[in-house]
Image (cartoon, grey):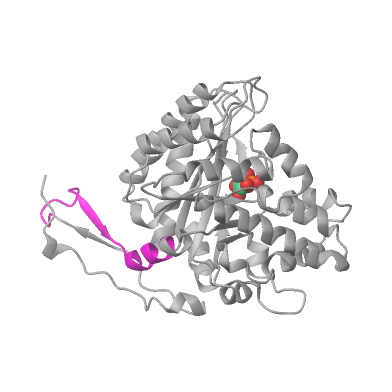
Amino acid sequence: MASASPSLLKSSLVLDKSEWVKGQSLRQPSASVVRCSPTNPSALTIRAGSYADELVKTAKTVASPGRGILAMDESNATCGKRLASIGLENTEANRQAYRTLLVTVPGLGQYISGAILFEETLYQSTIDGRKIVDVLIEQNIVPGIKVDKGLVPLAGSNDESWCQGLDGLASRSAAYYQQGARFAKWRTVVSIPNGPSALAVKEAAWGLARYAAISQDNGLVPIVEPEILLDGEHNIDRTFEVAQKVWAEVFFYLAENNVLFEGILLKPSMVTPGAESKEKASPQTVADYTLKLLHRRIPPAVPGIMFLSGGQSEVEATLNLNAMNQSPNPWHVSFSYARALQNTALKTWGGRPENVKASQDALLFRAKSNSLAQLGKYTGEGESEEAKKELFVKGYSY
Ligand code: 13P
């Protein structure tokens, strides 16, 4: 096989890196594929991505110390469920009011580096007419976009699912970039009680890898999220075993698709017992298993690991993250929570304008608690009585 000659590698066309902040930079020429052997067209090819430097910079910005991601990319259907829980109808106006509340929290950018948006929100304005993307950029928060098209049954499997959205993804991604997005998210799931079958794991990994390559080709840092669902009666060792298999396959296909590891972010589930398991794991145990998994499977070139909360309580998600940051890690270990950041804020708001300030304070408090946990310095100070009870049960006393 011919080896790559550096002189054959096309130098990358790099954007002015300050430009994304203004959200105005224009689409650059697509990544170039350079054949290393002019006589054998099927020989090794090397991608020299036109966005490489920018991707690395965006990923580092999102994975910056003491900050994490606010996941606010609930689909309209899921957002409807959240609104129904506080007695609101699932209208565009209500979704807009809620999302306005989230992005306008004063000082949010101190703790939040990125916000994942649903497509509607990427093109939406706040209730007072400012573009949501512009509000985020003013807050020093990088806008991101959910690009997958959701889960459907995987034929030939054990009632498992696969994630749609690759068709047309390149042109959608280019449009999202124009609109100001600088990172993307694709969530696929793996179910332990249903197997997982080798077919479902391979499909999940391959889909994530194709999505990641297409995102990078269009200037978006891909968040790679194979969510290993919490549901099930299995113990923590079984979760660990499945997670090892899933991440091995994901990285195999990411490499095969020439994805630049320095320009991705990961969104794993923490390694815990199944939600219906009799076994309960302390934050220390969750941290030990999860870090062992990450060390075995995740190359240090990856800048950030941004965990999902997956149905954990707010305090539990903060405690687990804090436990993982008690000693230095090769990657930024942080959060990309939806429910574990938003639950109290949503309940406090209840759809009433007079509660907006209290709701925003609640969100800022959770963001700050997780920021401290990212730094390994969370103490539980300022938590509600209810949360303190939970901390007490988990062996923390204040
Ligand atoms: P949760 O933190 O509520 O699990 O959601 C994170 C997310 O974005 C799932 O894709």
Give the quadrant of the N terminus: top left
* Nearer to me, 191 or 238: 238
Seen at 73% across and 58% down, the residue is 362
Q: Position of residue 180 (x, y in %)?
A: 53, 72
Decide whether residue 57 is among the magenta residues.
yes
Seen at 64% across and 40% down, the residue is 316
Q: Position of residue 57 (x, y in %)?
A: 38, 66
Residue extent of the magenta highlight: 37-59
Seen at 61% across and 43% down, the residue is 317
Decide whether residue 210 is among the magenta residues.
no
- Give the answer, above or below, for where 2 lies relative to 277: below
- Give the answer, above or below, for where 136 lies relative to 374: below
- In the image, taking residue 200 as reference, residue 97 lies left or right, namely right
Give the quadrant of the C terminus: top right
- In the image, taking residue 227 as reference, residue 241 lies left or right, namely left
* Nearer to me, 257 or 375: 375
Count of marks, rendered view: 0
